[in-house]
Every structure is written in C-alpha cells, then in structure tokens.
Amino acid sequence: MNGFGIRVLQCFVGIGLVILMAACGAPYAARPANTYQVYAEEARKLSSVRTGSSEVEVRGIMGDTALIVFSGEDYESESRPYRQISRTLANGWLATVLFYRVRIVHHDGICTDDETDAVVLLDGKVDTIIRGDRVEAFLYKFRK
C-alpha cells in the first residue's frame, strides 16, 4: 500500500471511531451525570408514597428496575429497592421494609442504612416512611 492509501485508511478508521464513540455515548446523554441528582429524584418519588398504599403501588412509584448512577466516566448499578427485610411481629402482623437510597453520607461506594429511607409496610400497607437507620428502633416497639 502506498502513502496515500495508508492516509485514506487512517482517515476512515478515525471517522469510524468518532461515529462509534458518539453512538455509544448517546444513550447516556439523557441520564443524570450527577449522583446527587439521581438520589434527589429518588427522594422526590418517595415523597409521592402515601400512608395506606400497597406494596405494589410503592413499587409502581419507585420502580423495580436497577438504578443506574453515573458519575463522570464511571457508573454503578443499584437494585431498587436497595434492600428488603420481612419480619413477623409479636402481634402477628407481617412487617416488610423496603430501603431506598436517597442520600450520600460518605463517598465510599458503600450504601449504609443512614443513606436510605425505608418504607415500612405493616400487613401489606404503608405505615410510615423513616430513615433507614431508624428501622430497628421502630420495629422494636412491636417486640414480644
């Protein structure tokens, strides 16, 4: 191949890479790049949940798909709800707690209960929404 052919080939490869990079980046352009925006949106949605709502209604408002958080070039995926626990209380009620991440306390990549708000359902209906690190104290009042 002569010098002209190599230049043409380099040009086509360069254009192809630019098109590929633009096409791959397009789906991410509409997503919030700021982690705080993502969790603020989660908190806004959580404010729509009302006492007496069913678990199905809560999951409909909050979504059940993975939450994708972008920060610069990196991204992470979190399940929604972030975690879930169920307990049978002393009075026979079933307590289901859905934890949703709504804030960042430490930038360590670990989600702890103080970074979540918890939707507490008693017998399938929303009883309260509290900070995730206060769930155990709330459930303690139903101890045997």
Image: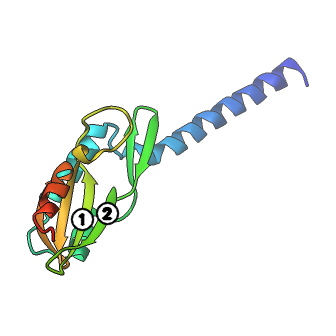
Residue toward you, 21 or 107: 107
Residue 9: x %, y % from top left: 77, 29
Q: Position of residue 32 (x, y in %)?
A: 32, 42
**Which residue: 31% across, 39% down?**
35
- Which amino acid does the dot numbered 2 rest on? Gln
Seen at 37% across and 40% down, the residue is: 110
In the rendered image, the vertical position of residue 108 relative to residue 138, given as above or below? above
Residue 125 or residue 141, whichever sits in front: 141
Residue 78 in view in this figure: yes
* Residue assigned mark 2: 84
Q: Which mark is residue 26?
A: none
Evaluate if marks 1 and 2 touch, with contact meaning CB atoms under 8 Å apart: yes
- 131 with respect to 107 (left or right): left
Q: CA distance from mark 1 to mark 2?
A: 6 Å
Give the residue at the far right of this rendering: 1
How many residues crowd around disc 1 within 10 Å: few (fewer than 14), some, or many (20 or more)?
Answer: many
Q: Residue at x 15, y 71 (%)?
A: 144
Secondary element at tag 2: strand
Camera-nearest residue between 58 and 113: 113
* Residue under the point 65% across and 37% down: 16
Residue 132: x and y, percent?
21, 52
Task: Of the two numbered discs 1 and 2 on the same chain, state the one appearing first in sequence.
Answer: 2
What residue does disc 1 label?
97
User: What crowding class fits label 2: few (fewer than 14 Cα within 10 Å), some (14-19), or many (20 or more)?
Assistant: some
